[in-house]
């Protein structure tokens, strides 16, 4: 199995019915844990009569991972959802599975299968793409040199912004890992620029 990480850029849903119960999975991109609570609140407002809102997510640097059973038997909902995110190598994603109780008990094996398969259905309904990790570099130095470097960054289409706080100026550059050496080579052309 490859260790290449994937992510998603849009939301997808999948509905699964099992023994009179309905499971609706929502898979969505997630840049920050704070965004997850907002998404959960939106889904809870859409499904006010649902009995459970079980979820898992993986996001951020360092990677933050969480699974929640929301009242289902321990390990029967959140962990199967998280297991699908991990086995499909997805990061910066969240998955919430809404359950409507239909009057029939599924038992723990039935719950595990339902939550796992609902999440998998939402993954298959999406279009996972390679996750690109970005580096952030701060460049310090004299204003004229920073402006010349900013011009070089624009020519190379590097994501660079100049920030000024009182008398101090610095450039923030966000780049893909393989671009790092090119950026450092350009910085080294200036005797008065340093980076961190």
Image: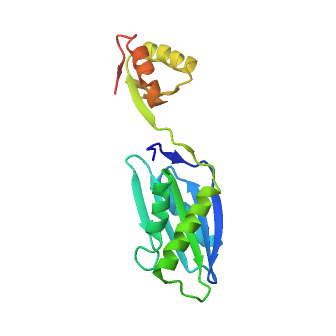
**Residue 108, position in %: x, y?**
46, 80
Camera sees residue 56: no
Residue 192, relative to residue 19: is it above or below? Answer: above
**Residue 23, position in %: x, y?**
60, 73
Q: Quadrant of the C terminus?
A: top left
**Residue 119, position in %: x, y?**
56, 64
Q: Quadrant of residue 145?
A: top left
In the image, what residue occupies the spot 59% across and 83% down?
101
- Asked if residue 117 lies left or right of residue 169, the reply is right
Foreground: 142 or 16? 16
Foreground: 153 or 141? 153
How many numbered badges does the structure rendering display? 0
In the image, what residue occupies the spot 39% across and 28% down?
138
**Residue 44, position in %: x, y?**
58, 71
Which residue reaches farthest front?
A: 1
- Asked if residue 74 lies left or right of residue 18, the reply is left
Camera sees residue 9: yes
In the image, what residue occupies the spot 56% across and 81% down?
51
Residue 165, relative to residue 20: is it above or below? Answer: above
- Asked if residue 169 lies left or right of residue 52, the reply is left
Foreground: 185 or 14? 14
């Amino acid at each position: 199995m490859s260790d290449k990480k994937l992510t998603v850029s849009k939301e997808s849903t999948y509905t699964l019915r099992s023994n009179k119960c309905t499971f609706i999975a929502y898979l969505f991109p997630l840049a920050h844990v704070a965004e997850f609570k907002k998404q959960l609140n939106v889904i809870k407002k859409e499904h006010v009569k649902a009995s459970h809102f079980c979820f898992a997510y993986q996001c951020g640097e360092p990677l933050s991972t969480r699974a929640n059973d929301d009242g289902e038997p321990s390990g029967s909902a959140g962990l199967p959802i998280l297991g699908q995110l991990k086995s499909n190598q997805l990061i910066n994603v969240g998955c919430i599975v809404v359950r409507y109780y239909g009057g029939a008990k599924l038992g723990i094996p039935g719950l595990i299968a339902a939550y796992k398969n609902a999440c998998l259905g939402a993954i298959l309904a999406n279009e996972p793409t390679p996750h690109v990790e970005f580096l952030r570099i701060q460049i310090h130095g004299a204003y004229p040199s920073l402006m010349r470097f900013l011009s070089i960054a624009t020519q190379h289409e590097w994501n660079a912004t100049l920030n000024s706080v009182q008398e101090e100026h610095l450039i923030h550059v966000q780049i893909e890992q393989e671009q790092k050496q090119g950026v450092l080579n350009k910085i080294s052309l200036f005797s008065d620029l340093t980076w961190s």
